[in-house]
Amino acid sequence: MTYPDYIDEIICRLEQAGASAYIVGGSLRDMLLGVPPHDYDVATSALPEETVRLFSDMRVIETGLRHGTVTVISHGQPVEITTFRIDGSYTDSRHPDSVRFTSKITEDLSRRDFTVNAMAYNKRDGLTDPFGGRDDLKKRLLRAVGDPHLRFSEDALRIMRAFRFSAQLGFEIEDGTLAGAVAGASGLADIARERIGSEFIRLITSPSPLRPLELMAEHGIFDYVLGGYVPSPRLIRAITDMPPRDIARIAALLSDTDRDSAARILRELRLSGKQITGTLAIMTGARMCVQTPADARRLIAHTGIYAADAARLSEVLGSSPSGAETMTQRQQNTPCSLRDLRINGKDIAGLGASGKLIGEVLNTVMERVIAEPRLNDRQTLLDMAKQILDIQQSKGNKNK
Ligand code: ATP
Ligand code: MG
């Protein structure tokens, strides 16, 4: 197994100073799986202050000194270096009350969540694997380190991590580990909503979300994630037919709820305003029946940049055969939004309209052009607008 020179340099420097140092965590797991790690985590027996001193010729960010983490920028790459530690007891099932540093790598590994995340490697010692992580990698199994009940009661976020890793890696969750997760689920009520939300979004956008979502549904985990809404097996299957983007997939999962409940659930997951707007637009668009080209243009007019996802969802749910049609309308550049019209608000004002009336006339013109795109010619639209305006104004006069 090899790692880049800039990591080797860090490990060697720590070793030369008399400390031990290893690659650990997700980076090692990915290396063993043959996947290039997105970043490297190094664990060392050196105390944080010592690490800071040893790398004083490089840029050092004191990320989480209290928890023993220092980030060193080595050849432009950030590397997290964390002192071996043992977590103290947990009273809030979130943050350990205290951390204690140790000089033994095996003690550090035993505080980690899953066996596949609890290995260490360097060139000098080879692989340190006290919990059979390598075996579990081969079996594609996610297994808690130590007693699962205890581990999930210490930190309930690990429950979400178990389902997320299962989706990300396509691993089964080992039976005892699953039982521990189910037993500890009520602990999720004490975990910060944004952490649950971020794990959940990672889960659903992963390559293998099906099995973990089914397990979550079967074991009541959604009580703590989607406020008790349980997506049906059909919707869980549907998400794998959606592009792996957060809003596209969450829209699919929430398709059996009404708009208000969906908005509430999305806020609970701490999604951003933009994500919430997008998800709701996709859900609304997916409910529009699209059979004709005019329907497809209407969908685009209503949902804008979310039209493709909306059309796809409607197709996946079998509501309409619209996906291809919507895309064709888009590519043909047929008029679907006010921006595409050959006239604008100023033109309507020029005809003598003002205030709210301008928008009303424009929207009526838009509706007609959606139904018949060939009408989108400037003179035709000006004549049409004049006519609509006359009718509106005569109605207005009658009402006076
Ligand atoms: P990825 O970065 O792809 O999400 P990762 O395994 O690197 O996966 P991180 O959250 O970056 O996950 O954490 C790094 C390592 O720290 C993990 O591999 C694990 O050993 C340990 N770890 C992280 N969170 C916890 C936790 N809540 N409980 C126990 N160990 C944890
Ligand atoms: Mg990581």
Image (cartoon, rainbow, N blue to C red):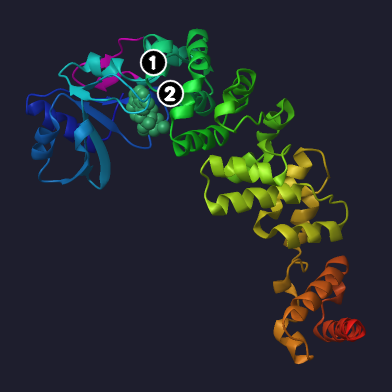
The residue wearing badge 2 is 158
- Residue 332 visible: yes
Q: Secondary structure at mark 1?
A: helix
Task: Say which mark, if any, is on residue 257.
Answer: none
Q: Amino acid at mark 1?
A: Arg
Element class at badge 2: helix
Amino acid type, label 2? Arg
Q: Residue 300, how many percent across, how many down?
A: 74, 59
Would the CB of label 2 be found within 8 Å of ligand 1? yes
Q: Horizontally, is 156 left or right of 318 in the view?
A: left
* Stretch in magenta: 118-131
Ligand 1 image-quadrant field: top left
As drawn, 151 above or below 327: above
Q: Which residue is pictured at 80% across the width and 60% down the height? A: 298
The residue depicted at 38 percent of the width and 37 percent of the height is 38
Instruction: Give the residue displayed 54% in from the left and 23% down from the top.
Output: 170
In percent of width and height, residue 323 lies at 77, 48
Other-residue count near label 1 (Cα within 10 Å), few / some / many at <14 / 14–19 / ≥20: many
| 125 is within the stretch colored magenta | yes
Q: Which residue is mark 1?
A: 151
Are circles 1 and 2 on residues that touch, CB within 8 Å?
yes
